[in-house]
Image: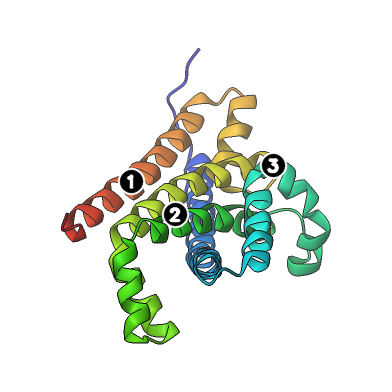
Amino acid sequence: MFNLYISAYDQKEIINALKDTLYLLSITSVFLIVVGLLFGFILFFTEQSKNHIIHKITGFIVDILRSVPFIILMILLIPVTVILVGTIIGAKAALPALIISASPFYARLVYMSLRDIPKGNIEALEAMGASKFTKIRILIKEALPSLLSGLTVSLVTLVGFIASAGAIGAGGLGDLAKRKAFASEYPVMIICIILILVIVFTIQLTGDYIVKKIDKR
């Protein structure tokens, strides 16, 4: 019989799982933004300067890392994870794989956003003799709506990665939903799924709202 009762212990598990998910999302998001912007700009500037070797090497690394399925990447990174965090179980153990998997995804979106900037704007910066820092600042301003749209997509994808990480012991809502499903404790499983959906829709709606506010086109 389908029991809707949620015990105090289950409530505590749900709260802890939510905390783990938000912890992983917040920490990984910081690295995703920094690393994604860094590699995205490297791809863009090396293409502009005709530095084909660095451009191709960077592009190859980005494409390889974002192409490897997340679960497989987690398994491949077990030795690295042990060295960095000292364990392969728990939320912290998922961080290396999450960062390495999600950052290249955003890096490619950053690169595509920068390429969409009109060439005339870039040529004007070159003609003015703008410094590299000035170029980066102006390019970010020009591409900001697209960069934020890409970030929104990346964060939504990241939530999916975090849920998948739970399948192999990383904790979080995905892990709790899986365990409760196997134990036929469906009310807890459904609550976990609803919370994941709430996180996803919050990210998507917030991102869309901000982009709509700043996009002057």
* Nearest to the observer: residue 206 or residue 12: 206
- Mark sitting on residue 204: 1
Q: Say which element carries label 3.
A: helix
Tag count:
3
Mark earlier in primary sequence (3, 1) = 3
Question: Residue beneath label 3, please?
Answer: 71
Mark earlier in primary sequence (1, 2) = 2
Q: Say which element carries label 2.
A: helix
- Mark sitting on residue 112: 2
* Nearest to the observer: residue 5 or residue 76: 76
Amino acid type of the residue that numbered disc 2 sits on in the rendered structure: Met
Q: Residues within 10 Å of mark 3 (few under 14, many from 20)?
A: some
What residue do we see at 47% from left, 16% from top? 2
Q: In this view, does 40 lie to the left or right of 91?
A: left
Image coordinates of residue 203 in percent, x first then y, are: 35, 49
Q: Which of marks 1 and 2 is in front?
A: 2
Q: In this view, does 65 lie to the left or right of 205?
A: right
What residue do we see at 36% from left, 85% from top? 130
Q: Is residue 66 visible?
A: yes
Amino acid type of the residue that numbered disc 1 sits on in the rendered structure: Gln
